[in-house]
Image (cartoon, rainbow, N blue to C red):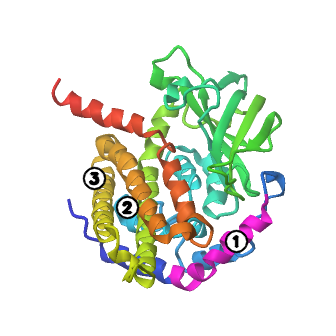
């Protein structure tokens, strides 16, 4: 396995770094602070995008730093998963940066679904405006009334009725549902209960303004609504869409999901590594610039050892994630399942520990909005549930490991 960055990748790393230095870091705290003022509370119908976001997106597009995640030379930049990974790391240093490059979740996963599995009609109608950054999307999978760690528990349904599909059910933690530009959801639901358990579900593209869709509420994540994107609960009651909105075919939902989740988990983990690098950087700056009991903070209470442990953990996490990316590119998602599950456990745990160390060195300042550490901590904890809880991924690793000996 060769993890050396190609010249093409090195060029993009420098360009992304330069763009963030010039355009994103100078306004980072302003955007965080003013976004909260623009979007108080859970009144999502009045949420607004910060006025600097769209101009920044235009600058990134003009700079050729747009849709970097997509391995297509015409619609993206033709980067492999391994080539894109270090770019996601750079974006992860600022929580909203990936949106500036049109590389944000859940849109990247939805665009990959439409790119790989959508037909010409579906790509023209929904993929094209998503790639242009004109609309946003959500993914409807998790449900409030069942243990969604087992995705086969889904109770939402999709039924074929003539030339239409009829959808019913509840979805929650649909990230991006509150965004003013959110126009569609990819809705996954039970369609073929007579099939084996991984061939019972389907995915359907559903415009969010379709009659019968009700957005019940936005959910707080550790006390924050994450406006203006948010995480919402929606109920679908006899929602009717044309059967042309069905992706691939009835019962193909899990097959599509496997293709969606592999690269997306690389993106999540590399962004998390970027967060960890930023947290460690902040800890070092704080620890060396402040003194207590006659010494710099970094020289007190075992902090030097904690810094060493953080550096070791970050490097281990990065190498494991790059290995998973290499396997996806060279062996396919199916043959990278151990690595994909492993990084989903290891990387958020690493991020939690590094951020916690940085908060401790910052003292009370680490818990407030003067630094991004509290936001990093909430994101790290949430990632241990997003795309499946730790226990599911550990179960996958154990199952595949035991298989070697059976």
Q: Is residue 231 left or right of residue 395?
A: right
Mark carried by residue 80: 2
Q: Is residue 298 visible?
A: yes
**Secondary structure that dominates the magenta span:** helix
Q: Is residue 31 magenta?
A: yes
Q: Which residues are magenta?
A: 19-40
Q: Quadrant of residue 196?
A: top left
Mark 2 nearby-residue class (10 Å; few <14, some 14–19, many ≥20): many
Circle 1 sits on which residue? 33
Q: Earlier in the sequence, mark 3 or mark 2?
A: 2
Q: Earlier in the sequence, mark 1 or mark 2?
A: 1
Mark carried by residue 52: none
Position of residue 60 relative to residue 146, above or below, is below
Q: Quadrant of the N terminus?
A: bottom left
Q: Secondary structure at mark 3?
A: helix
What percent of the width, then of the height, locates residue 379?
53, 55
For the residue pair 189 and 358, the one nearer the viewer reads as: 358
For the residue pair 169 and 242, the one nearer the viewer reads as: 169
Q: Secondary structure at mark 1?
A: helix
What percent of the width, then of the height, locates residue 234?
73, 38
Circle 3 sits on which residue? 330
For the residue pair 352 and 179, the one nearer the viewer reads as: 352
Q: Residue furthest front?
A: 293
Position of residue 187 relative to residue 371, above or below, is above
Position of residue 136 relative to residue 200, above or below, is below
- Look at 44% across and 55% down and name the residue there: 352
Q: Secondary structure at mark 2?
A: loop
- Look at 70% across and 28% down and name the residue there: 169
What percent of the width, then of the height, locates residue 48?
78, 63
Tag nearer the camera, 1 or 2: 1
Q: Quadrant of residue 238?
A: top right
């Amino acid at each position: 396995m060769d993890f050396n960055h190609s010249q093409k990748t090195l060029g993009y790393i420098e360009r992304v770094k330069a763009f963030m230095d010039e355009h994103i870091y100078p306004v980072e705290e302003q955007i965080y602070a003013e976004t909260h003022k623009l979007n108080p509370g859970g009144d999502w119908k009045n949420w607004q995008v910060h006025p600097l976001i769209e101009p920044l997106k235009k600058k990134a597009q003009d700079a050729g730093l747009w849709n970097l995640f997509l391995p297509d030379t015409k619609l993206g930049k033709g980067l492999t998963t391994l080539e894109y990974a270090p770019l996601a790391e750079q974006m992860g240093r600022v929580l909203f940066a990936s949106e500036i490059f049109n590389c944000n979740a859940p849109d990247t996963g939805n665009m990959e679904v439409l790119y790989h599995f959508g037909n010409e009609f579906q790509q023209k109608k929904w993929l094209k405006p998503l790639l242009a950054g004109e609309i946003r999307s959500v993914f409807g999978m998790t449900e409030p009334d069942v243990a969604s760690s087992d995705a086969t528990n889904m109770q939402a349904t999709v039924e074929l009725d003539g030339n239409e599909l009829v959808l019913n059910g509840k979805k929650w933690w649909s990230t991006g549902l509150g965004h003013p530009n959110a126009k569609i959801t990819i809705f996954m639901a039970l369609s073929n209960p007579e099939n084996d358990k991984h061939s019972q579900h389907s995915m359907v593209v559903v415009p969010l303004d379709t009659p019968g869709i009700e957005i019940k509420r936005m959910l707080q994540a550790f006390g924050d609504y994450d406006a203006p994107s948010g995480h919402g609960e929606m109920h679908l009651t006899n929602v009717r869409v044309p059967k042309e909105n069905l992706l691939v075919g009835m019962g193909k939902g899990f097959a599509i999901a496997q293709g969606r989740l592999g690269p997306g988990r690389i993106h999540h983990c590399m962004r998390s590594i970027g967060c960890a690098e930023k947290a460690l950087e902040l800890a070092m700056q704080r620890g060396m610039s402040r003194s207590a009991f006659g010494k710099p903070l970094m020289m007190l209470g075992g902090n030097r050892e904690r810094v060493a442990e953080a550096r070791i953990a970050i490097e281990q996490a990065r190498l494991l994630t790059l290995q998973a990316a290499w396997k996806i590119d060279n062996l396919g998602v199916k043959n990278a399942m151990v690595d994909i599950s492993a990084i989903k456990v290891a990387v958020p745990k690493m991020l939690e520990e590094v951020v916690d160390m940085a908060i401790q060195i910052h003292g009370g300042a680490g818990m407030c909005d003067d630094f991004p550490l509290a936001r990093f901590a909430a994101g790290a904890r949430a990632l241990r549930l997003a795309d499946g809880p730790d226990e599911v991924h550990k179960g996958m690793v154990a199952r595949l490991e035991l298989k070697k000996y059976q």
